[in-house]
Image (cartoon, coloured by chain):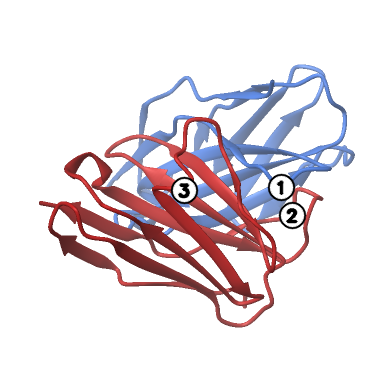
Amino acid sequence: GAVVSQHPSWVICKSGTSVKIECRSLDFQATTMFWYRQFPKQSLMLMATSNEGSKATYEQGVEKDKFLINHASLTLSTLTVTSAHPEDSSFYICSASLLAGVGDTQYFGPGTRLTVL
Amino acid sequence: AQTVTQSQPEMSVQEAETVTLSCTYDTSESDYYLFWYKQPPSRQMILVIRQEAYKQQNATENRFSVNFQKAAKSFSLKISDSQLGDAAMYFCAFALYNTDKLIFGTGTRLQVFP
């Protein structure tokens, strides 16, 4: 149980284009979903937290206009990287939890590798 | 602010032996959770073990166990009977009880030699 999927697993795009990454909880309804960014050989950095039907909460230093997050349902959250640039190239990971606000276990997706040319 | 420190960037262990990964954290709160996540080369984050701070008993999951020392703010992971498949990055993480935010350490790369 508690499986989270991400699509696509990897994407290459040209500078200036937008890219959408989907995160789905397959066998549970996720109250809260999270988006992380991971640079090579580094830890995960939380970008934003989203709850179904409400606006995402972004971490300090994360541009909300550049990284658009939509949590359309209890099983789907999307991250759109708008006007992508080479510095946005990274590994993006989503996670989901059953319960909100209680430090519940997060279940992670397999990640999406974004390369911006 | 809460912080998580993993002081061992890399560790190695012989197959079938035991290894302990260190983690310390800093918080002024008393209600929180601690986690160990494994990230193999596939990059899929996998929950290894979870500990509630209010529980004195150390969590165990098969070959994985923790040594939770609340007063010392220490949360080490012991892997017994190490297997080749245990080779991965291991991240220690912290979450306050009343929030959703996971705070990760910098990770420890574990190598397992046959």
Q: Secondary structure at mark 3?
A: strand
For badge 3, the amino acid type reads Tyr
Query: How far apart are the two marked residues, 3 and 1, measured between alpha carbons?
Result: 13 Å
Same chain for labels 2 and 3? Say yes or no: yes
**Residues marked 2 and 3 touching at CB (< 8 Å):** no
Query: How far apart are the two marked residues, 2 and 3, measured between alpha carbons?
Result: 17 Å
Instruction: Give the percent coordinates (x, y) of residue B20.
Output: 53, 33
In the rendered structure, the residue with mark 2 lies on which chain? A
Residue beneath the point at 58% across and 27% down? B23
User: Compared to A18, does B50 lie above or below?
Assistant: above
**Residues marked 3 and 1 touching at CB (< 8 Å):** no
Residue beneath the point at 83% across and 43% down? B98
Crowd tier of the residue under label 3, counting other residues whose Cα lies within 10 Å: few below 14, some 14–19, many 20 or above = some
Q: Colour of chain A?
A: red
Evaluate whether residue B44 shows in this view. yes
In the rendered structure, the residue with mark 1 lies on which chain? B
Image quadrant in which you'd find residue B29: top right
For mark 2, what is the residue?
A104
Crowd tier of the residue under label 2, counting other residues whose Cα lies within 10 Å: few below 14, some 14–19, many 20 or above = many
**Residues marked 1 and 2 touching at CB (< 8 Å):** yes
Task: Kindly give the residue lying farthest to the bottom in the view shown.
Answer: A27
For mark 3, what is the residue?
A36
Query: How far apart are the two marked residues, 1 and 2, measured between alpha carbons?
Result: 7 Å
The blue-coloured chain is labelled B
Please tell me whether mark 2 or mark 3 is closer to you in this view: 3
For mark 1, what is the residue?
B100
For badge 1, the amino acid type reads Asp
In the rendered structure, the residue with mark 3 lies on which chain? A
Q: Secondary structure at mark 2?
A: loop
